[in-house]
Structures are given as C-alpha cells and as structure tokens.
Amino acid sequence: PWDFRSAPRRAKANPAFVDPHQLGALHTPAPQNPSWWRRPRVWIAAGAVLAFLAVLSVIAALIHG
C-alpha cells in the first residue's frame, strides 16, 4: 500500500498546479543582483577579517602583557 508514497518522482513539478500563496517566501525566486549585504560571501569575508583581528589582538596581548 505504500508504493505510491515511497516511489521516486519521475516528473518535475508542474507550476500550473501550484498555488504560490501556499509555497511561502522560501520558494520565491531570488533577485538577480541582490544588495551587497545580502550576499553570503560578504559576511564570510567580514567574519574572516574579524577572526583575524581577534587572533592578532590575543597575540598582541600575550606578547606585550
């Protein structure tokens, strides 16, 4: 009785049968050029710079006492 529920999908979803109001914000298309603060690489680079500065400050505190 579970064949239909566990069988792999063979066809792509047909958007004609999907209500966009039920999908929610996660399924809305992303803009082509998002603003700079919404790009994940900007936050990764900012985090790397902050981690580097934190390590430098710890090293400077250990050296200079």
Image (cartoon, helix red, strand yellow):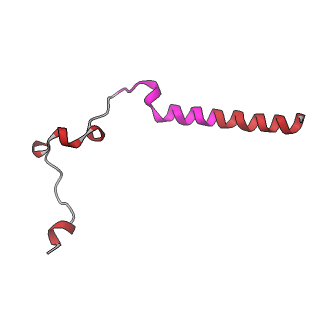
What residue is at 22 percent from the left and 42 percent from the top?
Answer: 23
As drawn, the residue found furthest toward the left would be 16
Q: Residue furthest bottom?
A: 1
Establish if 17 lies above or below 57.
below
| Residue lying at 47% horizontally and 27% vertically, measured from the top left | 37
**In the figure, residue 50 lies in which quadrant?**
top right
Compare residues 65 and 63 and report the one nearer the observer. 65
Q: For the image shown, how many numbered marks are present on the structure?
A: 0
Magenta residues (range): 33-49
Q: Would residue 20 be found to the left or right of residue 26 on screen?
A: left
Q: Where does residue 43 sit, x and y in percent of width and height?
A: 52, 33
Q: Quadrant of residue 58?
A: top right
Expressed as whole percent of the image width and height from the top left, the position of residue 22 reads 19, 42
Q: Residue 41 in magenta?
A: yes
Q: Is residue 46 magenta?
A: yes
Question: Dominant secondary structure of the magenta stretch?
Answer: helix
Q: Quadrant of residue 1?
A: bottom left
Is 14 displayed left or right of 25 in the figure?
left
Residue 20 at what x, y percent from top left? 18, 39
Q: Quadrant of the C terminus?
A: top right
User: Which residue is found at the position 85% from the left and 39% from the top?
Assistant: 62
Residue 49 rendering spot, x and y as whole percentages? 64, 33
Image-based side of 35 in relation to 54, left or right: left
The vertical placement of 61 against 8, above or below, is above
Q: Residue furthest top?
A: 35
